[in-house]
Image: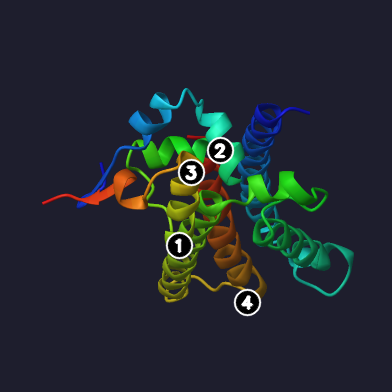
Amino acid sequence: MTCDASVEAAERASRGRAIIMAIAAVVLLINAVIQMGDPDYVRPGVRGGSWVVLVGLWMFIFANGGGLRLRGRMRELLNDELSLRNRARAVTAGFYMALAAALAVYLVTWRVEIVAGDAIKLISAAGLATALFVYAWLEWR
Amino acid sequence: MAEGLGNRLRDLRAERDLTQAALAEMVGVSRKTINTVENGVFIPSTLLALRLARALGCPVETIFSLED
């Protein structure tokens, strides 16, 4: 592989990663909406645990830049200075969105009862999906 | 251009007949990073600024300068 080719391959991989993260954000939100209010999804068991697996998996992938299978040069190019800064901005956006979601849930509980598990899902989905979306957008543009 | 920081990276790279991808390869970053530095969207770290200077064979002050 020539020098320029490795940079071009990293660019393609970076765009692919952005698409995957945007899709993951949508999947996360859809899951949160589908599971909302269903007691089976907050009880101990496979369904209840599926949210933990989903959020844990994407949190892990997001935290290491989605380059789990990449090694050496490609990993370095995909997680370069700009990409790390983009991820930091995405984490900040996700943090503020999670706080806003927590405040919103708190206010909603004045009128409607929300199960703790559902509240946690709303907050974690809002935070993580925002972080994934923002990262995808910053990496794509 | 980011406020307060001027850079001549695009001109200096063009003078040396380097593509963004080639310069990116020389300093170990993505082509997008070079592009965003050239456009003033991204202010590089001191480390990356020094690596760019080394790759272009000029002092870092030749590439980056404070705008009055």
Cβ atoms under marks 3 and 1 closer than 8 Å? no
Residue A138: mark: 3
Residue A87 location (% of width, % of height)? 54, 56
* A85 vs B23, nearest the viewer: B23
Residue A111: mark: none
Q: Is mark 1 on a helix, strand or loop?
A: helix
Please give the residue where the numbered disc 1 appears in the rendered image.
Answer: A97
Badge 4 amino acid? Ala
Q: Distance between the residues labelled 1 and 4?
A: 18 Å
Residue A94 location (% of width, % of height)? 50, 61
Q: Which of marks 1 and 4 is nearer the N terminus?
A: 1
Tell me which corner region of the image, top left, top right, bottom left or bottom right, holds residue B6.
top left
Name the chain letter of the residue that bears numbered label 4: A
Please give the residue where the numbered disc 2 appears in the rendered image.
Answer: B24
In the image, which is nearer the foreground, mark 1 or mark 4? 1
Please give the residue where the numbered disc 4 appears in the rendered image.
Answer: A116
Q: Distance between the residues labelled 4 and 3?
A: 33 Å
Residue at 73% across / 27% down in the picture?
A: A2
Label 1 crowd (10 A; few <14 / some 14-19 / many >=20)? many
* A35 vs A26, nearest the viewer: A26
Residue A134 seen in this snapshot: yes
* B41 vs A34, nearest the viewer: B41
Asked if badge 1 and badge 4 are on a common chain, one would say: yes
In the image, which is nearer the foreground, mark 2 or mark 3? 2
In the image, which is nearer the foreground, mark 1 or mark 2? 2
Up-down relation of residue A28 to residue B20 (above or below): below
